Amino acid sequence: MLLSRTKSKIWIHNNNSPNFSCSSFKDINTLFSDDSDYNSPVSTTTTKKPNIFHRVLRVNAVLRAFSTRPAPAPESTTPKSIQIPAAEKKIVIYFTSLRVIRSTFDDCKAVRSILSSFRVSVDERDVSMDAGFMEELKTILGTRVKTKLSLPRVFIGGSYVGGAAEIIQLHEAGELKKYVEGLTPAEFSTCEVCGGNRFVLCEECSGSQKCYSEKSGFRTCTVCNENGLIRCPSCYYPIL
């Protein structure tokens, strides 16, 4: 369309022309088409996707639900029903005095020190002095013969309490003193026969584990243990 004025000619493009195009307004058609889409009816079958804000809220709610859920209580592996006879008024501890395994020796030493601080009767059974103590412990706990048991093991008032971890935990929490209430007080006198060692040298073989007779020659001593020792008759306690 051409408009004529005084001395100049101006060309004006009609925007309504179907052939109108402009490189700087290349997205105008798209904008117009988007506006027309909003006026079109929305299909009832189309579901609107939640925005990122709602999705974050849902994830946080799920995480809070899992975090507030109470954790299942761990199953107790300590056999609380295990009892040891003839020990209702004292503490019985199975330990080792050997330093072969340093951690085991330190645990035994720490537990013995804790138990002795209560000044009650403590029956100490050293498995390194007599292997029969270990067999006795396995019989009490009902374990297999070839099973290796960790030491120490403590019985208070005839009931099994546990090992080093349980004793130390109870002592630090102040609960161990409740277990030892009513037990027989410790005797501070030393045995005149064994000197408090609970064992004496075998009189049959003099600790050599060999006995000689003219009829059969040398034979293994059946009185003493593998170390050539017998339990002191003054502070004797039978193996179960």
Image (tube, helix red, strand yellow):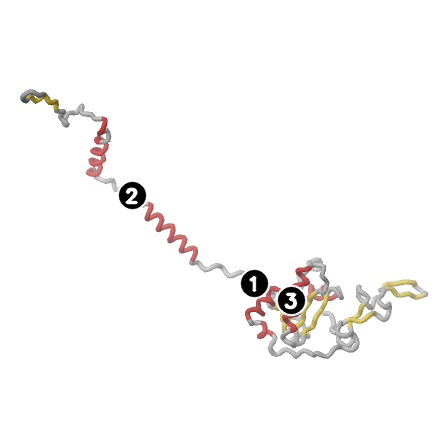
Q: Which residue is mark 2?
A: 48
At label 1, the amino acid type is Ser
The residues bearing labels 3 and 2 have C-alpha atoms spaced at a distance of: 68 Å
In the picture of the structure, the residue carrying the numbered disc 1 is 76
Label 3, secondary structure: give it.
helix
Dot 3: few (<14), some (14–19), or many (≥20) neighbours within 10 Å? Answer: some
Where's the N terminus, which quadrant? top left
Provide the residue designation for mark 3: 110
Q: Residue furthest left?
A: 6
Q: Position of residue 140 (x, y in %)?
A: 67, 66
Q: Which mark is residue 85?
A: none
Residue that sits furthest to the right in the current view: 214
Q: Residue at x 61, y 75 (%)?
A: 180
Q: Nearer the viewer, residue 84 or 180?
A: 180
Determine the residue positioned at 21% across, 31% down: 28
Is residue 13 shown left or right of residue 174? left
As helix, strand or loop, the secondary structure at mark 2 comes to: loop
